[in-house]
Every structure is written in C-alpha cells, then in structure tokens.
Image: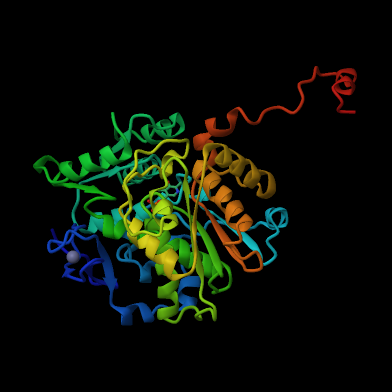
Amino acid sequence: MTVLGTASPARNLVCRACGATYPLAAQHACFECFGPLEVAYDIEALKQVTREQIEAGPNNIWRYAGLLPAGQDEAARVTLNPGLTPLVRADLLAAELGITGGLWIKDDSANPTHSFKDRVVSVALSAAKALGFQRYACASTGNLANSVAAHAARAGVPSVVFVPHDLEPGKIVTTAVYGGDLVAIEGSYDDVNRLCSELVETDEFEDTAFVNVNVRPFYAEGSKTLGYEVAEQLGWRIPAQVVIPMASGELLTKIDKAFEELVEIGLVEAPAEGWTVFGAQSAGCNPIALALHNDTDEIQPQKPTGIAKSLNIGDPAAGPYALESVRRTGGWMEYADDEEIRAGIQLLARTTGVFAETAGGVTTACLVKLVKTGRLDPAKETVVFNTGEGLKTIDAVAEQVGPTYRVKPSLKAAKEAGLL
Ligand SMILES: *Cc1c(COP(=O)(O)O)cnc(C)c1O
Ligand SMILES: [Zn+2]
C-alpha cells in the first residue's frame, strides 16, 4: 500500500527493538526481529511548529496536527474531533490525601465516545484512509470498539470490531448502536487480539485497517496528544508527576514520549528535576506492575480477572517500554483490587465531580497507595489521568450507592425520615 502524504512530518517507521527502518505503511512488526514499530519524524519539521500556531488551532487534537503522523489535511481526516478535554483542579482530593504541590485530573471521559481512545482512533483511521483502507476494525477491551464504530459511522465506512464476549453491557450497547459489525469472541482480550492478528493476514481482510494491529504505529501516536494537552493547559509546563492507567502500557509510554518531544523541539523548557511517571493496574491484571515489583524485565502473561475490564490485557505489548519509562524517571507502579477500585471511583466522584469508569477507579486507588507508601512526593505537582466514563461501567458501583433517604411526599414524612 501507498505511503502517507508529504504534509506529514513523519518520515518512516522504526523498530523499537533493533532500530531497523521501514516506509510509512501498514506494518506493525519488524521483519528482522519481530519488534514493534513506531513512527519516526523529521525533527526539523517538528521544530517548525510554534506555540502560537498550536494555540490558534482548533479546540481538539488537530491543533497538534503538525506533530502527528496523519490528518494534516482537514478534509482527509476520519475523526470525531476529540481532545482538549478538561484539566480539573482537584483541591479537595489533594487535601484529603495530603498532596500540597497541586493535583489535577485530566478528564478524558469528556471525549466524544467518552474515553481517551477517540484520540488514538482519529489518528489511526486518518492514516488508514490515506493508506487506502476500505473498512475499519479493532481488537478491543470495550472503549476502542465504541470509538472505532463511531468513527466509521461518521465517515460512512463499514466497520467490524472484535471484543471479548463478557464485556460490560454499557460497552456493548454503546458500540452496537453505531450499526457496524460487532463480533463477540468466546475468549479473553488476548484471544481476541491473537485472532485479529490472524484475520489481518487473510485475503478477506486485506482492505481492513485494524487500528491496533496493522496500523498500530499510527494508533499509538494519538496517545501523545494527552501529554501535549496537559503541558499546554498548564501554561506550557510539564508536571513533576503523572499517574497513568495501563492496559497494553502504550498510553503511559506515549505520554512520557510526548513530554520528551516537547522539550526536544523547544516548545517547553526542560524541567530542572525532570518528571516522574507512575503506572496503575488492577490486581486482577497486573503483569507490568508485578514485573517492576519483582525487579525483572520478564513480563509474565496473565489470565485477567476483576472489574477493570478495559485494562484487562494479560499480555501487554508495550509492557517493556512502560517499565523503561517508569524506571528511567524514578517512578513506580501500583495495583488495586476490586474493592479498592470501587472506593477509588467513589473517592474521585465525591471530591472532584468526575465520575470515572473502573479504569479511573484503578488510577485513583493507585494514587492513594502511591501517596501512602511515599513513592509519590505530595509536595510536587501531580496530574492523574482519568481515561474513561463512569456511565459505561455503572454496575461497578451500583450496589455501593443509592438514595440517602426514601420519603413520602409530605413535610411530616420528611421530618420523620430525619430530613428536618
Ligand atoms: C485502553 C484504555 C487504557 C489503556 O490503554 P493502553 O494504551 O493499552 O495502556 C486506559 N484506560 C482506558 C479507559 C482504556 O480504555
Ligand atoms: Zn527490529
């Protein structure tokens, strides 16, 4: 298939493991060593991008088009225009946890399909369109399926999304409503992913872009916009500490990479003490965090369990790179069990007005642990990433919360119930 257009600052794909380079095409693994490929840029082209240009751009991820591999031409985008989501000051949560350096929630539940996945899908499918694909697909733990189905619907392109059969009802409905094909696989996400890797090699799927399989290098770049936005929203500053949920580990590595790039191309001054990256997983699926705790590079694949289904990737593709980011920046990883996740959702909601899905409960619960164990410095500015919407996983807390009072509609009854 053809390579991307000349307006893109991307120049080639490069193997993260051995450094071999390839043209900008639909390829995700190195022919030499099977390592994952990522997009490499013309650094001089990136250095042309100014703060003023970005600030004058649209109120969505495309303000960073000059830093992305695809979507420079507005008419050629496949997008719901996600991004520029709220960076919420969380003073009450900070007070409760004893954080004095400033605490923010980057609330990506505000995206069009209510998770950060709209960012990666917009970039991946804009690349896929430029590369000539006719159908859009993905292997998903839920949110990605929502986003691919919605993007395909907006573009008028057929879609087929693959999910584990036991997803939350709130993620099946919010995908199926867009009308594309939804395939429930009787297996785990890792089974779904393996099947999609096989399908993509067949003649029947030759015209199909799987956002996180054959066009994965472009998909991954979309995550960087979360890092760019946080820096811009803080007044072109990189926060001292970030806490990020991990499924494949890609999001974490790309936020770190976004910060590195902003410094490298001169859009942000390098913070004197650098920044520190923290990762969050659930106890039911913690292969990356466990490798860190066991001080090993070997990530042992797991069979995921527990309520944080959007993070349930037992064999995380970017795990080694997430470990590298966290070790290099002096951070740490934690994991939270289902009870802690439920408490995390409620704590975040009660103190910030942000209702997160289970992944946000994981991240909040891990923030609490990182503060308690002294791994996270409460005197330093911290940004916590909420990547998904609570209404999609409402069952997680349905039994924990409900009406405070049940009262007949009279003053007498209200008094008897203790309201007066
Ligand atoms: C997919 C997802 C993540 C993590 O994504 P990775 O890049 O695979 O680590 C985090 N939160 C939510 C809600 C997600 O859907
Ligand atoms: Zn290689």
Q: Give the tally of numbered discs.
A: 0
Give percent across and percent down for residue 359. Answer: 49, 45
- Looking at the rendering, in which quadrant would you find the N terminus? bottom left
Q: In this view, does 161 lie above or below 257?
A: above
Image coordinates for residue 10, horizontal then vertical, percent: 27, 70
Where residue 82 appears, x then y in whole percent? Answer: 45, 54
- Which picture quadrant has residue 132? bottom left
Q: Could you tell me residue 227's position as x and y percent? A: 47, 65
Q: State the scheme by which the image is colored.
A: rainbow
Dividing the picture into quadrants, the one containing residue 263 is bottom left
Looking at the picture, tell me which residue is in the foreground, 248 or 89.
Answer: 248
Q: Can residue 210 be seen in this view?
A: yes
Taking 363 as reference, is 68 above or below it? below
Q: Which of 147 and 142 is in front in this view?
A: 142
> Which residue is more in the foreground, 72 or 314?
314
Residue furthest out toward the left: 203
Point 42% across, 51% down: residue: 290
**Is 48 situated above or below 315?**
below
Q: Residue furthest front?
A: 294
The quadrant of the image that shows the C terminus is top right
Side of 337 where 195 appears, left or right: left
Residue 207 vertical placement versus 65 (above, below):
above
Please tell me which residue is depicted at 25% across the width and 40% down the height of the picture: 158
Q: In which quarter of the image is residue 129?
A: bottom left
Residue at image coords 77%, 25%:
405
Asked whether the viewer can see residue 87, the reply is no
